[in-house]
Amino acid sequence: MPKRVLLGLLLACGLTASALAQEPKTGGVINAVIQPEPPGLMLAMVQNGPVQMVAGNIFEGLLRYSPKLEPQPELAESWSVSEDAKTYTFKLRKGVTWHDGKPFTAADVLFSVEMLKQTHARARNNLAQVDKIEAPDDYTVVFTLKQPFGPFLGIFEVGSMPMVPKHLYEGTDWKTNPYNNAPVGTGPFMFKEWQKGSFIRLVKNPNYYEKGKPYIDEIYWQIIPDAAARSVAYETGKVDVLPGGSVENFDVPRLSKLKDTCVTGAGWEFFSPLAWLWLNNRQGPLADKRVRQAIMYAIDRDFAKDVIWNGLGKVATGPSASSIKYYTADVPKYPYDPAKAKALLKEAGYKGEKIRLLPLAYGETWQRWGEAVKQNLQDVGMNIETIATDVAGGNQKIGDWDYDIAFTYLYQYGDPALGVGRNYVSSAIAKGQVFNNVEGYSNPEIDKLFADGAVATSDSKREEIYEKAQKILVEDVPVAWMLELQFPTIMRCKVKNLITTGIGVNDGFKDAWLDK
Amino acid sequence: MLSFVAQRVVKGVIVLLAIVVLNFFLIRLAPGDPAVVMAGEAGASDQIFVQQLREKFGLDKPVPEQLFIYVKGIVTLDLGFSFRQQAPVSKLILERLPATLLLTLTAFAISLVLGILFGTFAARFAGTWLDTAITIFALVFYAMPIFWVALMGILLFSVTMDWLPSFGYETVGANFSGLGHVVDVAKHLIMPAMTLGLFFMATYTRMTRASMLEVKRLDFVKTARAKGLSDAVIQRRHVLRNALLPVVTLAGVHSGTLIGGAVITETVFAWPGIGRLMYDALLQRDYNLLLGVFVICSAMVLTFNLITDLVYRLVDPRIEFTS
């Protein structure tokens, strides 16, 4: 079955390549699934996955990123970097208008940056190195950094830095601004209608600056809360696109075999979701490195990939996913070896102390994975107690460090300085917050390497630094890396060019067309 | 009767306020708050961000102050603001109310009509194959989980036969109007309403049957028979009418839960109702929205309990209102 999926993926890649060669046709409607229902569509105010998936069609960033994560023009048509790598100058596209007809200018960029610093946690962190931002004219924006910041050109995609219309938000109470629920952007599609609990309707922007685009007339985002019902909706032809993660993984092989169905794993290169187990390094047996290493040896990650994830994804080798910059496979290896795990536990003096495991409440696949890991750990003699919570309760427990082992998966945002370091540097240890260094790992050498890596300007220097950091981390096992996840997008084969960038369906459907 | 109603209304308002206070604290007992959930969803969190969110939601204030602000709002009929959905709670509930009422009232009507009908037949033909068949039919629908019935219904009527739509309130993008729209909504309504209705129907069937068999044995039925009344008249005028009292009580309890009681059905069929709104609000710890739905549901239960008491009087004239 996994082989068939792989074949499907390969076929889909081939189909995508052939679609690029065809002449796009205009017109038609795409019905896609969105789940859960977004709380709002103002990307600058709320940044969860579903918000970006819909609003990525309405709003735009200064840049897009290719599947290889190279910057491409979007609202900025060109950019340059000074020799000291501290000044970045963006030339904005002329003739771009907001959906209400007002022109998009450098003033909007300046306003957006100031707003995002207050409303967008990730943008604020990304912009921490910015000393000042200026607009010498209406179509030029200059960022001056306090010190060089290697991944700076990687922070301008729509989800990380969406442009906000200054004329609609300046001087208003942002959180109650009526445009939060009827957003106005510069993107290829305009917001038309939202029937809460049913669907969100976007229509073609007739004044879009890229002539001829978008090709599609309308997009309906259908809100279907139950995973099985989403599968049925596709099966019965009511929706055309199931973005990655829309259905349970065990439904993917069945759906991918349906007539006129194409599957692709592309479009997640920027996010590179990596699943791991938080290991609370502070207390109990897990404070001992040997016990953490034993966990790595005890867990059959190939089984998880092949059985629980139906062959989708890849066994993780360390803190960086293989698709992001400066990844190295040259790190200590932890194959499935229960005997070695038992020996390490014995050496560490583990005496059957109870260890609490928090599965992730993201549906059936994750529950099954929790059970498999529990069984693996029990097989080597660990005393595991599963603690069931919902997502909010789990986040609270993890943020309060009230756990021993907990499942998670996080995005890497293309660069170790953006999405990796935050989980291992000691400055990111802060109680009450999730998704930072909640395991409590502290190593001055790692702190220095990530600090140096962020400000190093040459690629070779950064590569050297991050490779070293990966080796140290994999030896220390601050967390137990599991899988590089793959969330395949399932769609009718008539939908062409749906995914053209490293951000996938989150980047809008401006290149997509229907081969009717 | 008026003083009876007035007294019940006053008592109802006091109970409602007590429920508000209790719910206010119960919700806060669950681990996690809206700020933690939203920070988690944003894929990054820092102290400033979480603190900002708490300030925005008013969660940085002492709990008694938060309660005071909330109760003050309720007294002035203001259910508060859902910061997660960036809209007033009352607007969010009103948007979902029509769909929920359509679903639950239809299901309620199906369950009551079929339940009483089947219960009457089962009692009339007690001990025969018809009674056994009705009992098994009722028990099967009562015993099967709603989500299972729903999924099997989808599999049969949507996937295999392609007779009915599997999800939603209407065909999105079809833009039907007039009779076409009514037919379209009705098609979407059949499966969720039957799923929910058949579950409650089972209870009414069992209760009507048991109650009728009990009443049948009473002396006044013998008297009626001795008077020479036909069996149909005895069943309809004497047995059924008296046997309906417990059914009315149960229907009263069920009708109070009409607004929030269809969470599973609404989720499986993607029906845009209040049950789903409540479920999402719970998972996301959207305190104001969740409390708002609870307030409306509690008010419904209290109102329907009062209506049930009034209906008793109609069904059984021997019952008198006392203040």
Image (spheres, rainbow, N blue to C red):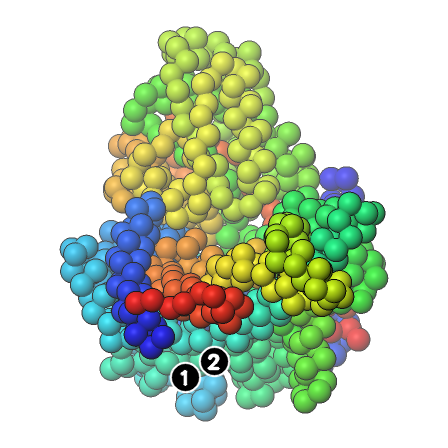
Q: Residue shown at 59%/26% (left/top)?
A: A300
Quickly name the residue at label 1.
Answer: A104
Residue B96: assigned label:
none
Q: Are marks 2 and 1 on the same chain?
A: yes
Quickly name the residue at label 2.
Answer: A186
Front-lying residue, A280 or A117? A280
**Left or right: B134, with A40 as reference point:** right
- Picture coordinates of residue B296 (x, y %)? 39, 67
- Picture coordinates of residue B109 (x, y %)? 62, 68
Amino acid at the residue labelled 1: Phe
- Picture coordinates of residue A123 (x, y %)? 34, 61
Q: Are marks 2 and 1 in contact (CB under 8 Å)?
A: yes
Q: Residue shown at 37%/81% (left/top)?
A: A178
Q: Chain of mark 2?
A: A
Mark closer to the chain start, 2 or 1:
1
Examine the image and state in which quarter residue A230 appears. bottom right
Q: Residue shown at 35%/64% (left/top)?
A: B295
**Left or right: A305, with B255 as reference point:** right
| Quadrant of the frame with the N terminus of chain A | top right
Mark 2, Cα crowd under 10 Å, few <14 / some 14-19 / many 20+, is many
Amino acid at the residue labelled 2: Thr
* Residue B183 visible to the viewer: yes
Indicate the secondary structure of the residue bearing disc 2.
Answer: loop
Examine the image and state in which quarter residue A466 appears. top left
Q: Residue shown at 58%/61% (left/top)?
A: B242
Mark 1, Cα crowd under 10 Å, few <14 / some 14-19 / many 20+, is many
**Left or right: A424, with A254 as reference point:** left
